């Protein structure tokens, strides 16, 4: 009997950042992150050098080949925060083209914002997560609905069918956005999986 406890095998991922002492992409797709200011810290199992800590002016740049969502997408990540200000965990943000998306914490809740020149959609899960403990978020788009699940709870969903997916050409960022130094994460991030 085979028990597969992982939702996806590593080779099915577009990118995987376990932060095992660095910001390398361990999916094998070469989207290694370059760290700007973030520091290695303990993960949710108290293992040292296995997650990154951000204090509001740090980020990790992962290059422009990742995060161009054409149709379906899946993002999973672990995080801590005590902030209630708008803080962006993951993004691809090109204001020149008018296309961007980001996954953020605001008011203690995890949400996604997608923007095109013609449309803007925002949705957040109602679970309050800014208690400083480790939490897991899954954000999934099936071509019609965006589903957000916190700590493997029942997904909450919203109709994003007008979001067809797009290419932005911008840098895929862990913490903050490419266009300015605002909204960078305060807390920890870890185990980011993108499919
Ligand atoms: Ca880790
Ligand atoms: Ca810093």
Image (tube, rainbow, N blue to C red):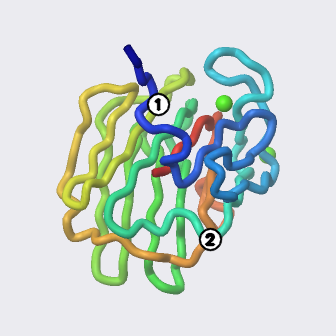
As drawn, the residue found furthest toward the front would be: 1
Q: Residue at x 20, y 51 (%)?
A: 158
Disc tally is 2
Above or below — where is 55 with respect to 5? below
Q: Which residue is mark 1?
A: 136
Residue 64: which numbered mark, if any? 2
Position in image of residue 133 (x %, y %): 54, 21
Left or right, 137 with reference to 121: right
Position in image of residue 97 (x %, y %): 48, 85
Q: Residue at x 41, y 42 (%)?
A: 110
Element type at marker 2? loop
Left or right, 98 with reference to 30: left
- In terms of depth relative to the viewer, which is nearer, 77 or 127? 77
Q: Residue at x 79, y 41 (%)?
A: 22
Element type at marker 1? strand
Position in image of residue 67 (x %, y %): 51, 63
Whether the residue carrying mark 2 lies under 8 Å from ligand 2 is answered with no
Position in image of residue 130 (x %, y %): 49, 30
């Amino acid at each position: 009997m085979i028990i597969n406890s992982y939702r996806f095998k590593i080779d099915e991922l577009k990118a995987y950042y376990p932060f095992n002492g660095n910001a390398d992409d361990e999916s094998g797709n070469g989207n290694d992150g370059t760290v700007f200011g973030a520091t290695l810290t303990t993960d949710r199992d108290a293992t040292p050098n296995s997650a990154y800590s951000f204090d509001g002016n740090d980020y990790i740049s992962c290059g422009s080949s990742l995060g161009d969502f054409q149709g379906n997408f899946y993002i999973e990540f672990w995080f801590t925060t005590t902030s209630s200000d708008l803080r962006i965990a993951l993004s691809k943000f090109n204001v020149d083209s008018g296309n961007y998306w980001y996954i953020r914490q605001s008011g203690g809740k995890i949400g996604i914002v997608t923007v095109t020149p013609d449309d803007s959609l925002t949705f957040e899960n109602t679970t309050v997560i800014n208690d400083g403990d480790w939490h897991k978020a899954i954000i999934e788009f099936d071509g019609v609905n965006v589903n957000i699940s916190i700590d493997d709870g029942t997904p909450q969903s919203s109709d994003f069918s007008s979001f067809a997916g797009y290419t932005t050409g911008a840098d895929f960022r862990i913490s903050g956005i490419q266009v300015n130094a605002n909204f960078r994460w305060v807390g920890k991030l870890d185990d980011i999986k993108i499919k």
